[in-house]
C-alpha cells in the first residue's frame, strides 16, 4: 500500500498542513479527472457527428478545450502520484487516462480504492483538545 509523505517526527501542525495538502490534491485530481473525462466524451460524440455534417468548428473548439484541460489534469495528477508514491505503471495509467474516453473514470476509481483511500485513512492528524493539550493516547 502507498504511504503518504507524512512525517511522524514533525509537529502536529506540520502534519495537519501536509494532510490538508493531500486532501486538496486528491480533490483537485478528482475534479480534473471527471471534467477531462466528460469533455473527452463530448469531443468523441461531436467527432462522430461531424461525419454527418461539414462543421469542423465545434470539434476544433472542444478539442482545444480538452487539450488545455488535459494539461491542467497532468499538472494536478502528477504531484498526487508522487505524494502517494505510486509505482510506475499506476502513475502511467493516471497520466494517460485523459487520452482515452471513459478511462479517467475507471482509473480514478481504481486509484481511489487502491491508493487514495488507504493513504487518507493512514493520515491521522493530532489536533489539540479544548484545553489546548494533546491527548496522551494519540501522541507517539
Image (spheres, grey):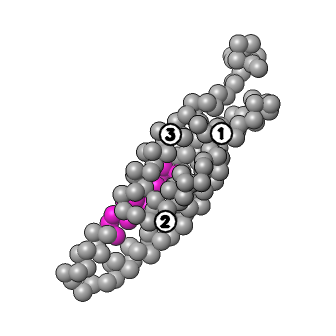
Range shown magenta = 29-43
Please tell me which residue is depicted at 19% across the width and 81% down the height of the picture.
52
Q: CA distance from mark 2 to mark 3?
A: 25 Å
Q: Image height check: is 125 above or below 49?
A: above
**Nearer the observer, 35 or 9:** 9
Q: CA distance from mark 1 to mark 2?
A: 26 Å
Mark 1: give few (<14), some (14-19) or many (20+) Cα within 10 Å: many
Q: Residue furthest left?
A: 52
Q: Image height check: is 115 above or below 128?
A: below
Q: CA distance from mark 3 to mark 1?
A: 13 Å
Please tell me which residue is depicted at 36% across the width and 62% down the height of the picture.
101
Q: Is residue 45 left or right of residue 68?
A: left
* Secondary structure predominantly adopted by residues drawn in magenta: helix
Mark 3: give few (<14), some (14-19) or many (20+) Cα within 10 Å: few
Mark 1 lies on residue = 4
- Tell me residue 75's x, y (percent): 59, 61
Amino acid at each position: 500500500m502507498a504511504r503518504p509523505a507524512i512525517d511522524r517526527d514533525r509537529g502536529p501542525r506540520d502534519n495537519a498542513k501536509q494532510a490538508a495538502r493531500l486532501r486538496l490534491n486528491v480533490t483537485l485530481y478528482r475534479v480534473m479527472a471527471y471534467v477531462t473525462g466528460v469533455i473527452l466524451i463530448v469531443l468523441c460524440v461531436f467527432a462522430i457527428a461531424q461525419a454527418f455534417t461539414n462543421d469542423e468548428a465545434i470539434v476544433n473548439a472542444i478539442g482545444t478545450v480538452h487539450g488545455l484541460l488535459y494539461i491542467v489534469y497532468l499538472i494536478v495528477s502528477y504531484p498526487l502520484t508522487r505524494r502517494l508514491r505510486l509505482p510506475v505503471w499506476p502513475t502511467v495509467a493516471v497520466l494517460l487516462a485523459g487520452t482515452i474516453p471513459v478511462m479517467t473514470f475507471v482509473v480514478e476509481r481504481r486509484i481511489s480504492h487502491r491508493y487514495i483511500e488507504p493513504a487518507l485513512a493512514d493520515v491521522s492528524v493530532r489536533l489539540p483538545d479544548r484545553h489546548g493539550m494533546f491527548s496522551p493516547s494519540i501522541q507517539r
